[in-house]
Amino acid sequence: MNRLGIDLGGTNVAAGIVNDAGEVLYRYSAKTDTKSERSVVGSLSKAVSSLLEMSGISADEISVGVACPGTVNSVRGVVEYSANLPLCGTDVAGMLSSETGVDVSRIYMANDADAAALGEYRAGAGRGAHDFLMITIGTGVGGGYISDGKILTGRNHSAGELGHTVIVYGGEPCGCGRRGCAEKYCSATALVRLTKAAVAECERRGVKTLMTEIAEADGKFSGRTAFRAADRGDEAGAAVVDEYISYLSCALTNYINIFQPEVLAVGGGVSNEGERLLEPLRNRIYGEMYNKRQPESFYTKICRAELGGNAGVVGAAMLGL
Ligand SMILES: [Zn+2]
């Protein structure tokens, strides 16, 4: 069976036909039409029909997987709720089946962070692991946990919201209604907030920091500003990096204590820092986690995700496996 995966986002639809090794053979990308429920499903069927045409594969020779932000009932193929898309109780699988001619029994759905985790588990950083945890650091913090090939969904399809676990009690208010969520301290958005606060503090004290000139050269403050300043010996930049890593290690240590995965992969823009981020992160986590006195062979391997922006498409395509 050929496999087609679609990563449906609030801005873009990315899709592809993927082989069993996780390679994307044909690729499709377009803007999501977010006007209505119908237009979103229309964006999905356009991705399917374009890829079938490109590859010469027919609708009865393919399975389709859709990764979607929000609460996705993977059993019924229904998006229960999505904050970024006008889908609420929408029978996406049924509508997509009638528009494309792909039998509904071969249409699979999952939450986007879960699909990305499955992609890494099958074809990326989690290959060969029995238990695998993936954290994606972007505007928010997403997570997905796979054990023995199965995505942990909980009874209501909203398990694994790791970004909405509290690491600073009574801390920064979060969109979910709580305070001090990991997302408010570990996301790229949070790193930019910490960077700007440190620059403002330097200005108040009349201290120069390289973060200002790096942000000017880049045209904005970003997740890399403090890292680049720290690389060049800037003390305030190094303090921001240290503070950020202390928050992130607190969150990841909690996740390891709960799940004890064989492999934990970190994805998203911040993971581009590679060992610059991962080495100090491991040092802190391995010193704090519950099983620190066990032999090192029992430690969770902490590494960078491998599939980058393809994880969602690859994982969606693998949903039917
Ligand atoms: Zn939250």
Image: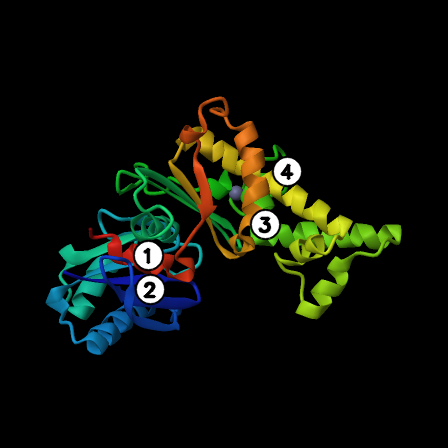
Q: How is the image coloured?
A: rainbow
At label 1, the amino acid type is Ala
Task: Tell whether circle 4 marks a residue whose Cβ is less than 8 angstroms from ligand 1.
Answer: no
Instruction: State the residue position of label 3.
Output: 276
Of all residues shown, which one is farthest toward the top?
A: 293
Q: For marks 3 and 1, give the one nearer the viewer.
A: 3
The answer for how far apart the CA atoms under marks 4 and 2 are is: 36 Å
Q: For marks 3 and 2, give the one nearer the viewer.
A: 3
**Mark 3 vs 2, N-terminal side:** 2
Q: For marks 3 and 4, give the one nearer the viewer.
A: 3
At label 3, the amino acid type is Arg
Instruction: State the residue position of label 2.
Output: 37
Where residue 3 appears, as percent x and y from the top left, is 21, 61
The answer for how far apart the CA atoms under marks 3 and 2 are is: 43 Å
Crowding near the residue tagged with mark 3, few <14, some 14–19, many ≥20 C-alpha atoms within 10 Å: few
**Mark 4 vs 1, N-terminal side:** 1
Where residue 220 appears, as percent x and y from the top left, is 67, 65
Answer left or right for 41 relative to 1.
Answer: right
Q: Of 207 and 109, which appears nearest the observer? A: 207
Is the residue under label 2 in contact with that under label 3 (CB below 8 Å)? no
